[in-house]
Amino acid sequence: MENQTSDSRLVTGMFTDRDSAERAYNALHSRGYTKDDVNLIMSDDTRKKHFADGVHETELGNKAAEGAGTGSVIGGTVGAIAGAVAAIGTSLLIPGLGVVIAGPLAAAVAGLGAGGAAGGIIGALVGSGIPKERAVVYEQGIKDGHIVMGVHARNEDDVKYFENDWRANNAQEIHY
């Protein structure tokens, strides 16, 4: 984990499984953050593995089910995880990469159109404020089946809270 500057409030972490991601997502809600504040990035295979139909019901899972097929799609269909935050609005699948992005970051990438989305995972992550070196680590994690979650923390207390909570929930590569 690294600190950028005191002005940087984007907190990101990588989770290896649905349960860890669920707990982190719930920690965000406990601090007053909504689905509109949360970014998720994962491979479509990871989405299918952890958030496919018929998986036990949770808030994140329910949102995944209700949001399936909504949002922007570039070159494919969006599966259930897009709805993890897709009731938020925008989610998309980047063609050729098999990566699902949900949350405000998806809206930004979709705004760039297919050409911008073709910049891939690293381009999307760097565009969201993550340093390129960290984006490379997250890209590999996504390819390895991990879930990357990010939120713009409102204050330093929230940054510390998320760092501690996510670490307790097995997050890897926490960055802010």
Image: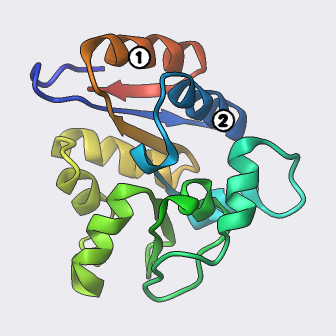
Sooner in the amino-acid sequence: mark 2 or mark 1: 2
Q: Residue at x 46, y 89 (%)?
A: 75
Residue assigned mark 2: 22
Question: Looking at the picture, how far across and down is residue 137, in whole percent?
Answer: 34, 41
Q: Judge by depth and name the residue closer to the eye, 97 or 154.
A: 154
Label 2: which secondary element: helix
Question: Looking at the picture, how far across and down is residue 175, in whole percent?
Answer: 30, 27
Q: Residues within 10 Å of mark 1 (few under 14, many from 20)?
A: many
Instruction: State left or right for residue 98 relative to residue 59.
Output: left
Label 1: which secondary element: helix
Image vertical order of residue 148 relative to residue 52, above or below: above
Instruction: Give the quadrant of residue 46.
Output: bottom right
Residue assigned mark 1: 163
Question: Looking at the picture, how far across and down is residue 94, in whole percent?
Answer: 42, 75
Q: Residue at x 26, y 39 (%)?
A: 134
Question: Looking at the picture, how far across and down is residue 69, in whole percent?
Answer: 64, 78
Residue most extreme to the bottom? 75
Q: Residue at x 83, y 64 (%)?
A: 53
Instruction: State left or right for residue 121 relative to residue 96.
Output: left
Identify residue type, mark 1: Glu
Instruction: State left or right for residue 159 relative to residue 149.
Output: left
